[in-house]
Image (spheres, rainbow, N blue to C red):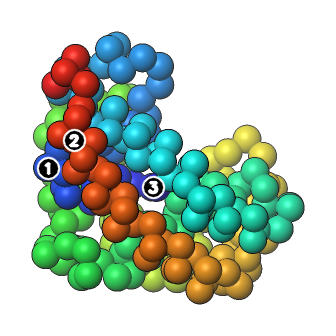
Amino acid sequence: MNFLAHLHLADVSQTSLAANIAGDFAKGSIEHFPKHLQQGIWLHRQIDQLTDSHELTKELLQKFPKSLTRAAPIIIDICFDHMLAKYWDEYHHLSLEAFAIKAYDAIDECDELPEGLVSIAPKIRKENWLVAYRSPKGLNQTLVSVAKRVSKPEIFNGAQETVKKLDIEIETAFRTFYPQLMAYSRLWTRNTPTEYL
């Protein structure tokens, strides 16, 4: 899952939005991070682990061409955010625009976030990444942007064409898997290890 899904799942589970998205930038032992971030980072890692190991994700990965093997997990995360944004009204009572502002404010107001998130947060708000995910153009721009940030951008060659070709398969996997992930997020929140609370 990418930024939008992690923020949405934080809201669904009534945990810290900023702490959950911080999980993308938090490396190493959770104990090294401030207490107010620990539950969110832990939840983020549970979400990523289930997403990566789930049969639906594995089946979807197999549909990608061999040339995209390394990039496919990242592409799927981004596409799932696109699907969540596209069908947002089915998953949340706030509009996507209102939720995006709520998320940006939560990030700005949170202390001691990982440096990587602090440095990119102004760009996330300025370019309104969470809302941009909704359109095919925004999806393609995100794929291009992510490719530029990796050491070997060529692993994303053909990503846009493949995503367009697999649109139905991606949507089917998302719609089947995401409600399960929402339920698991609530369950994990109730069962967070006490040392992270």
Q: Are marks 3 and 1 in contact (CB under 8 Å)?
A: no
Q: Earlier in the sequence, mark 2 or mark 1?
A: 1
Q: Quadrant of residue 168?
A: bottom right
Q: CA distance from mark 2 to mark 3?
A: 19 Å
Q: Which mark identifies residue 2?
A: 3
- Whole-angstrom CA distance, mark 2 to mark 1, is 8 Å
Q: Is disc 2 in contact with disc 1, using a CB cutoff of under 8 Å?
A: yes
Secondary structure under tag 1 reads: loop
What amino acid is labelled 3 in the image?
Asn
Q: Earlier in the sequence, mark 3 or mark 1?
A: 3
Q: Counting other residues with Cα less than 10 Å from the Cα at mark 1, is it few (<14), some (14-19), or many (20 or more)?
A: few
Q: Position of residue 185 (x, y in %)?
A: 29, 50
Q: In the image, which disc is placed on residue 14?
A: 1
Kindly identify which numbered label has been placed on residue 52: none
Answer with the quarter of the image where residue 130 lies: bottom left
Residue farthest toward the right in the current orientation of the protein: 66
Q: Which residue is mark 2?
A: 189
| x 14%, y 49%: residue | 14
